[in-house]
Image: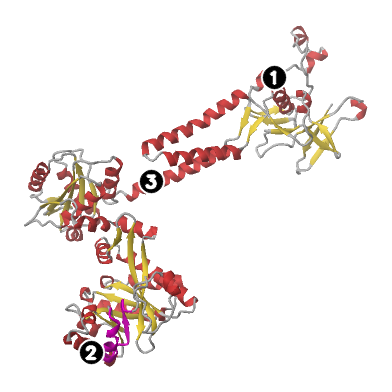
Amino acid sequence: MVDRIVEEAGGEQIYKRTSPNIAGSVGRVVSDQTHRNWYGLAWELRYYYEVDGKPMRSFGSAIGGVKGKPNAKFAVDYGFGHNRLPILPFEAVSGADPQSARDPLEVTGKTVVLGHSSQVAGSKQPIPRNINAPSSYVDIYAGESLKAGNTGYIRGGATLGFFSLALLVALLLSTRRKRRWTAYAAIAFMVPALLLASAKIGIRIELSYALGFLGAYAAFRWRARWKRRVEMVNSETGLPKLRALESRLIRDKTGSGHVVIAKIQNYERVLKTLRSDDKGSYVLKLVDRLRAADPNLAIYSDGHHLGWHVASDDTNAVTDHLEGLRAIFAAPVQVGGFSVDVGITFGVAAIDDDPTVRLAAAIAAAEETSEAHNPIAVAETGSQSDLLWDISLRARIDEAMEAGEIYCVYQPKIDLASKSIAGVEALVRWHDPARGFISPQHFIQQCEKAGRMEHLTRYVLQSACSAGQLLHFRGRVISMAVNISATLLGDMRIAGIVRNVLQATRFDPAYLTLEITETARISDHTVAASILEELRSLGVKISMDDFGVGAASFEAFYELPFDELKIDRLFVANMAKDPKARAIVSSIAAMGREARITVVAEGLENPQDIVLFEEAGCQQVQGFAFSRPLSLSDLLEYQDFTLNRPVANMV
């Protein structure tokens, strides 16, 4: 007799058993019809279930004739179709159905189960491929699994670990894109292969965790590839960017031919006169002319540069072809109902080593061209401009900041009255893993040309203010100075950048000094003055860097609100040996006293010259005579010192 454990509508488990008056003394087994997963399927059953505190043998274990341990489980194999189970209506046994009696079902030597069909309410249980099977089918499959020995079960954690390891090995060993895709295909093929193999040998394998992991990885990779594709496409023209050309040259391991970069002359001025809808059309019309000889030529666009790869190794043939293209561009193009003159020049670089370097060399050569004197420039192999333009690419700068290759060092400023540190100046540095240290002057200029100066300034401000906050927390309450390019004083956005950084880092603005560099480049002093006043309203101080150099220095000093002057190192370095330099420094210091602003002498390298600056009336000095620029960790260890204890060699 089979007793049942069922679940009522309220979720309560009920034990149902046949009355002893009916069952008599026959043996009893139990069918736990609540031992199911979230989907109502029974993938694992027990050999015994606990009833009234005692273990009772399960129905499936009794059918299979296998006794296991009381708490042990076994997997159920649904490897054969439910239609293969022979069914005999009860009417055939009782003789009520003469037709069934004439064609009896052979049951000799078989285990016969008498139970409800699926047509009886409350007696249905889902099994794979049949959601309305009789409840006894689950135990019948369990018994058949035990008889056949098909009770093996590989759990989801094991399959997840296997596929994770396979994916890790594929990523480590498949450095090339083609091999990596082959490895991905092999891993995907493993899924149906494992299912078929496990079905053949009668082992149940759980792949849900592994499939979820592989699906998540595929989605992540797809999103990364989609994002990379979007980043490499010019939104206005739909053409791939020069970064895509660089990736293609690296991927194809291109070692021959030439890289050609066309520079569109007066590009920015033309764009100002066109509507936004016509800007992309203007560039595409130029691309059509470049494809005059080869309609399928792959051309890449980035700002006022158009680039492509030429397979020919003959430099003269390439330049002759470009001369012919220039003749085509002699005629104006029609854009938005207007006739627009076109000026175009070319930079050429032969690919003889690193394609990335040669692409940068071609860009550098294009920038050196002019329509009148040098319309086609061929880059020299190994020229110094290669390095300059290699680091000027916008992607290099952004990636370097994200990777921490661009960072800040800090040079102390010494107060001559107290002979102690009054503050530090944050100086930006770039250490490229392949190129080594890059000159700040070079990459800052390229940041300006690439339109990334705001991004770099925000990055340096964030780093410097965070460092200043840490110094204050450690008890070193000193000021922090950050350089601000004069090119940013034409837009109020710089005030928003400073405000947001101060709020994010919680650095006291009273200890932040903004040093304005290259004031000669300020185009509108009225606008610059309003921006500087807005910055001062935040509580920060404004310093004029490199004072004394440049035609606009005195004009800027007069018209703009500065709290500090930094005397240019040209005069500081010659203070001891040149009376003119001493006179200039003394006059600037006197002017600062009259204007009631701080005067700082930067670039002091000889400690013996300190007396001269004290006599001249400078309040602060800065230079290698006291300390080279320090990393933040060294600065945290850096203690106050006197002039008898210089640290010029501390790095």
Of badges 1 and 2, the one in the foreground is: 2
Q: Are marks 3 and 1 in contact (CB under 8 Å)?
A: no
Secondary element at tag 3: helix
- 10 Å neighbourhood of mark 2: few (<14), some, or many (≥20)? many
| Nearer-the-camera pick, 269 or 444 | 444
Name the residue: 38% across, 45% down.
Answer: 225
Q: Amino acid at mark 3?
A: Trp
Secondary element at tag 2: helix
Q: Amino acid at mark 1?
A: Leu
Give the numbered dot on residue 586.
2
Image coordinates of residue 629 in percent, x first then y, are 35, 72
Question: Circle 3 sits on which residue?
Answer: 226
Q: Residue furthest top?
A: 102
* 46 left or right, relative to 191: right
Name the residue: 78% across, 12% down.
Answer: 108
Image coordinates of residue 167 in percent, x first then y, are 48, 39
Question: Circle 1 sits on which residue?
Answer: 85
488 is higher (above) or lower (below) than 284: below
Magenta stretch, residue numbers:
605-625
Where, by quadrant of the figure, is residue 486 drawn? bottom left
Q: CA distance from mark 2 to mark 3?
A: 62 Å
Q: Amino acid at mark 2?
A: Ser
| Nearer-the-camera pick, 238 or 228 | 228
| Nearer-the-camera pick, 335 or 169 | 169
* 30 left or right, relative to 207: right
Name the residue: 67% across, 34% down.
Answer: 41
